[in-house]
Amino acid sequence: NPVPVITIDGPSGSGKGTVTQMLARRLGWHLLDSGALYRLTALAAVRQGVSFDDHAGLVQVAASLDVRFEPTPAGEPVRVVLSGEDVTREIRTEAAGDNASKVAVVPAVREALLQRQRDFRQAPGLVADGRDMGTVIFPDAPTKIFLTASAEERAERRYRQLKEAGHDVKIDALLDEIRARDDRDMNRSAAPLKPADDAQVIDSTGLSIEEVLEKVMAASGQA
Ligand code: C5P
């Protein structure tokens, strides 16, 4: 596939969501927030009364997701519309992230979302954010980044993000949740969170988002 892709994988709170949005905007490329698809699958399952143990049901939900990602002004998160309803805020809670990681362990759910993700690869290019973008979804991507940061710093960032968005959260609880989610993401058998062999690892601990963006641009030859 000649359409270029920059994959940005890493644990939650590593800054990859923000960096992906800034990079896509700067390059004028498309954006894939793959985590949103898992968050939406979990949310739709809850709404339809499908249990997370019902794998066939989850596959059905994933395959029939009616979702639109709508552009927003610079600096604002992409608007996520599920079956006609704006769920942008709802899918960003820690509970939604935790539920996402529970449906994401099911191989058939990942399979059901595979082609939908690959379809985002359209000219002039794609910046894709997730856990398995470089390892499974776009193994031929010319540029693969793995973005990390210490768990403490990631908890701190999530805390500030959620506070700003008006959510009431506690930092200790966030740190516990981040560790539990990392653990689930790294230790599952289907597409576990890990850098691709040919990924460039960037540690964002102590860096500002602008500094991370510069490093990612340099690593992708776009600086
Ligand atoms: O990136 P985000 O925090 O939105 O992802 C939510 C959850 O979805 C992750 O914790 C992970 O379990 C799952 N996920 C995944 N593969 C991806 C993206 C997200 O398994 N490519």
Image (tube, helix red, strand yellow):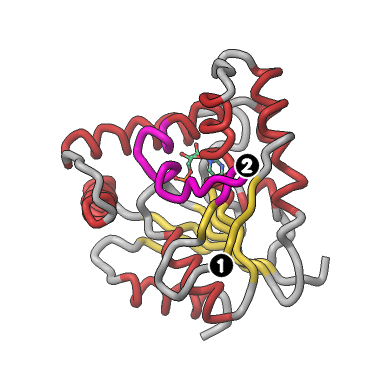
Q: Whole-Å distance between the Cαs marked 1 and 2?
A: 17 Å
Q: Is residue 88 magenta?
A: yes
The residue under label 1 is 71
Residue 185 at least partly seen? yes
Q: Amino acid at mark 1?
A: Pro
Horizontal relation, residue 125 to residue 216: left or right: right
Q: Residue 68: x, y in percent?
A: 63, 53
Residue numbers of the magenta segment: 81-98
In this picture, is 198 found above or below 214?
A: above
Secondary structure of residue under mark 2: loop
Q: Which label lies toward us, 1 or 2?
A: 2
Classify residue 93 by image quadrant.
top left
Secondary structure of residue under mark 1: loop
Q: How many marks?
A: 2
Q: Amino acid at mark 2?
A: Ser
Q: Residues within 10 Å of mark 2 (few under 14, many from 20)?
A: few
Q: Residue 80: x, y in percent?
A: 54, 52
Front residue of 3 and 21:
21
In this picture, is 23 found above or below 8?
A: below
Q: Residue 143: x, y in percent?
A: 62, 68
Query: Which residue shows up at 55% across the image and 37% down it?
Result: 192
Front residue of 71 and 209:
71
Query: Which residue shows up at 22% across the image and 49% down it?
Result: 159
Query: Which residue shows up at 52% across the image and 45% down it?
Result: 194
The residue under label 2 is 83
Q: Most extreme residue toward the front, as rendered?
A: 84
Q: Is residue 21 magenta?
A: no
Q: Residue 27: x, y in percent?
A: 58, 80
